[in-house]
Structures are given as structure tokens and as C-alpha cells.
Amino acid sequence: MISDTITAISTAVGEAGIAVIRVSGPEAVSETEKIFRSKTPLTQAASHTVHYGHIIDPANGEKIEEVLVTVMRAPRSFTTEDVVEISAHGGVVSVKRVMDLLLQLDIRLAEPGEFTKRAFLNGRIDLSQAEGVMDLIRSKSDRAFSVALKQVEGKLSSKLRDLRYTLVETLAHIEVNIDYPEHDVESLTSDFIKEKSSQVMTEIDKLLTTAEQGKILREGITTAIVGRPNVGKSSLMNTLAQDNRAIVTDIPGTTRDVIEEFITINNIPLKLLDTAGIRETMDVVEKIGVERSRSAVSEADLILMVVSAAEPLHPDEIELLEQIRGRQSIIIMNKMDLTPQVERDVLLRYIPEERLVPMSVKDDLGVDRLEDAISTLFFSGKLESADLTYVSNVRHIALLKKAKQSLVDAYEAAEQFIPIDMIQIDVRLAWEHLGEIVGDTAHDALIDQIFSQFCLGK
């Protein structure tokens, strides 16, 4: 049982209209009352009510802040504990003064993610829902937010509970036959194991089908914009970001380092990397930038190679084309407003025609076609149905694959009529792997590691 009371700032620190300080634990109401003055004492306040008053320094009775205090009594709160939320004026000084007074009471500063961790430990949410909260906060597109929200609401948890129940049924059937072998019909038990294993494997396969898309929605596509100097890389970055994020000049080598920007294209989050123009150079600083560009190319999920349509291909560009051959890439023929001179037939040796995009970044032409090409490359032109249960967490994907492999082993063992007490080990492993996703069989160290990634106050 959790016996201490914690507090943390739940809104971003800085100047704002309002700042919220959260207090959770068995003494949340009684301890907060020691520094709060209002018409109604907090200890007498009904749950889910808001009270106007002042934060008072108990040492001298000085008014510290004018606030609204919300009371949520257990178990009807996020943590299932008594929770108090203090809404103060947004500002570093005002928040610090309130926090200083709270920490002088029998209240300690919360660890990162501790409010959500308490919600998990107290049984309000499972581990996958808790991770969904983190994904919700970090969402970079409407679709990513929608996927995370469904996870928070328990759509994935419900699916996994059903699969684990099927495996429990299988384990129970095996246990009965181990305990009462005289009633066992070996062929019937093997058929039952194969049927249930196949049933669960099919459902796992459906979840894994959405995993790549879910992972992209959650983490975004790391996209490197590459090419020779002055072909329009920085202009493309600014056009896609709809901001003058990168400096654009006619001087070759203007971009000396990798510039990052997050954007959303057709509801797909992209982490854009505008790289230094790849060329041989004696400039020490530019040379470092070129090396970083080559590194970005090797690590990127998507490569947007920009060439000038108004010039023949340069040997450096042929070398780059060789480097990206077979990779997820799109070639942009920029400056199509000028007389085309680029060897289109050479480009088509390295990339399919649907991934060769003519553009004039200067005239804002071809952007829609580029966006369609990216959607087609990663999502066959459109996202899957919003009704699907997406798996977007790398940890979840790995555990689903482990569970499936254990069931494959169980199925093959049943086909070979291996003793069922040996098959039971594989079925139980699959059950445990699925349980680790929702936290039922997760180790304390894993739970601590997951919640340590949360922001303070969540």
C-alpha cells in the first residue's frame, strides 16, 4: 500500500495564464489545507468540487497566491488516491512559492511519471495504457494522437486480455490431462492445443500487421534531404515546414550542419533533416557537415534526394544514387521551371517512376505530388482503418513476436505428439509475454524504467 503523499508541477514551467500543481496521496487534502484558506475547509469539501481562496504561509499568515483548488477524493481520481490540484497564476515565481510551502509539509516531490505509475499500481490502468498516456503527450499528428487515445482507453488491453484468456483455457485443459492422464485422449488434446494456438497466432498476426504503421505514427519517419549544394534542399525544407527554418542563398555550402524540423504530411509525422550539400571540399567546417550528411543518409528511414532538373547529373550525384539504391527513397527533380537538362533515364535506373517527383520549389509546384509519393511509399497511399487496434510501441511489438514464436513452438510440438507437459511450457511462455505488455507479468525493474521516461508531474 502506498502511504506517502507526492506533489509536482503538472504544466510546463514558464510564463502562462495558469499553472497547475498536483498533489496525490492519503494526506493530499489534509496537508494542503494547512496552507489554503477558503470559506469551506478542504477536509469538508465534497469530491470533484473547486474552491476559491489563497495560499497562506503558515509561519506568518502572509498571502502567497490567489488560487483555485480542485478536490478529487479516492477512488474517483486518476491515481485512485485523494488528489488536490492547485491552479495558480502561471509564472516561475508564483509556482515556486507554492511548491516551496507544499514541500515543507508532509509531502515529497514526485518522481518522473509517478502519478501515472500510481494509477497503474492501484489498478486503474494497466501498463500498456500507461505507455499510451506517454504516447498521447508526445503525439506529433492527429492520427498518432488517435492511436494513443485508443490505447489509453484500453482497446489494446481488451484484445490482449481476450487472447490471454484463450491461453488460460488451453493451460487449464493441459493441466487436467496431466493430473488425470487416465481420461486423456492424446489426439484430442493435441488438436485442442493446435486449434487454440492457431486462433491466438492469427490475432497476433493482425496486431503485427499494423505494427509498422503504428511505429511510424508514434515515432515519425526520419527523413534526410540530401543532394549537392544549391539544388534547393533548404528551400524544400522551408516549403515543407512552411517556415524559414533554413538559410537559403545562392552561395554553395551555406548549410554547414544538419538542421532538424518536425512536420506532418497527410497525417504522417516526419522528422526532416536538412543536410549540408554533399561535395568534395577543402573547407574544414563544411567537410564536417558533409560527413554528417553522409551519416544522416545511412541512418534515415526515408531519403529525399534533390537534383537540379536544369543541370546534367554530376559524378557526386551518381555516387549518391549508388549509395541510396534499394533504400526507401524519393528523387526530387527541382527547378522544373527552367529548361530540363537532367538525364531522366539515368535516374530511372535507380528508382521506380512513381518515386521520381518533378518540382519547382520556388514556384511551390509539385508539393502535393511529393506528399502523395511519401504516403504511397509507407502506407500504400492511405492509412489503415481508424477502427484497427494499432500496435506502435517497440516493446509491445517485440513481446508479440516472442509470444507468437512460443505458440509456433507449441503448435509444432503438438503435431509431433510431444508430451503435453513440455508443450505447456511454450503455451505458458506465450501467456507471460502477452502479460508483460499489460504489466501482469512485468518485473519491477521494467516498470521503473518505463515510468522514468515520463515527464515530471504526469
Image (cartoon, helix red, strand yellow):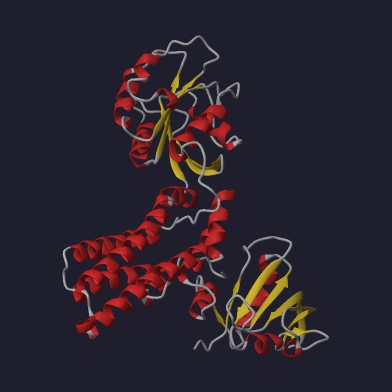
State left or right for residue 169 relative to residue 84: left
Question: Relative to 291, is 118 above or below?
Answer: below
Question: Relative to 73, is 255 above or below?
Answer: above
Question: Relative to 168, is 287 above or below?
Answer: above
Q: Nearer the viewer, residue 176 or 376?
A: 176
Q: Residue at x 59, y 81 (%)?
A: 80
User: Image quadrant of residue 420?
Assistant: bottom left
State left or right for residue 183 relative to residue 305: left
Task: Work out whether residue 280 can be spotted.
Answer: no
Q: Residue at x 80, y 87 (%)?
A: 40
Q: Farthest right residue?
A: 39
Residue 114 pos. (x, y %): 51, 75
Residue 312 pos. (x, y %): 39, 13
User: Image quadrant of residue 287?
Assistant: top left
Count of labels shown? 0
Residue 395 pos. (x, y %): 38, 61
